[in-house]
């Protein structure tokens, strides 16, 4: 299972998470900022008022470049970054 895309933003009150949601009824995509976990009252579409809302899941690794034919991780070229 791919974890949800959650961004954390530092505010004067503390860290705020950003949740990407989509309404199942009207298809509206929207974002909710919340300290802590997403609550049921956050899962309401601002366009149509529906509670049939789900969290969008995305992969941040999907666009890292072309597929490699080798298995495992390759060492960086150009020597060690630690001197």
Image (cartoon, rainbow, N blue to C red):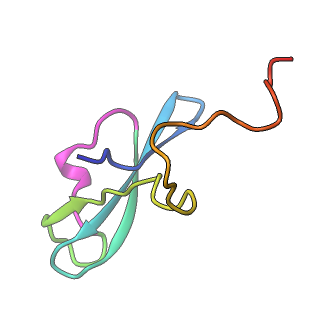
Answer whether residue 38 is magenta in the image.
yes
Which residue is more in the foreground, 2 or 10? 2
The percent coordinates of residue 40 (x first, y second) are: 17, 48
Residue 21 as seen in the image, left or right of residue 41 = right
Residue 47 as seen in the image, left or right of residue 15 = left
Which residue is the extreme one toward the right? 83
Which residue is more in the foreground, 82 or 19? 82
Q: In this view, does 81 lie above or below 46?
A: above
Which residue is more in the foreground, 39 or 2? 2
Q: In this view, does 18 lie above or below 29?
A: above
Q: Which residue is drawn at 35% across and 71% down?
A: 29
Q: Which residue is drawn at 57% across and 61% down?
A: 65
User: What is the number of callouts on the image?
Assistant: 0
**Among the 4 quarters of the image, the one containing residue 28:** bottom left
Answer whether residue 5 is magenta in the image.
no
Q: In this view, does 55 lie above or below 45?
A: above
Q: Residue at x 50, y 31 (%)?
A: 15
The percent coordinates of residue 6 (x first, y second) are: 41, 45
The percent coordinates of residue 82 (x first, y second) are: 80, 18
Q: Residue at x 23, y 71 (%)?
A: 23
Which residue is the extreme one toward the bottom? 26
Residue 2 as seen in the image, left or right of residue 49 = right
Q: In this view, does 9 lie above or below 63?
A: above
Segment colored magenta: 35-45
* Quadrant of the drawing holding the C terminus: top right
Which residue is more in the foreground, 57 or 11? 57
């Amino acid at each position: 299972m791919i974890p949800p895309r959650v961004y954390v933003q530092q505010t004067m009150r503390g860290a705020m998470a950003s949740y990407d949601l989509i309404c199942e009824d009207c298809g509206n995509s929207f974002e909710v900022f919340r300290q802590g976990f997403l609550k049921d009252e956050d899962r309401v579409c601002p366009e149509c008022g529906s509670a049939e809302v789900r969290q969008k899941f995305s992969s941040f690794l999907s666009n890292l470049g072309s597929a490699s034919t080798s298995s495992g991780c390759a060492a960086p070229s150009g020597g060690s970054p630690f001197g």
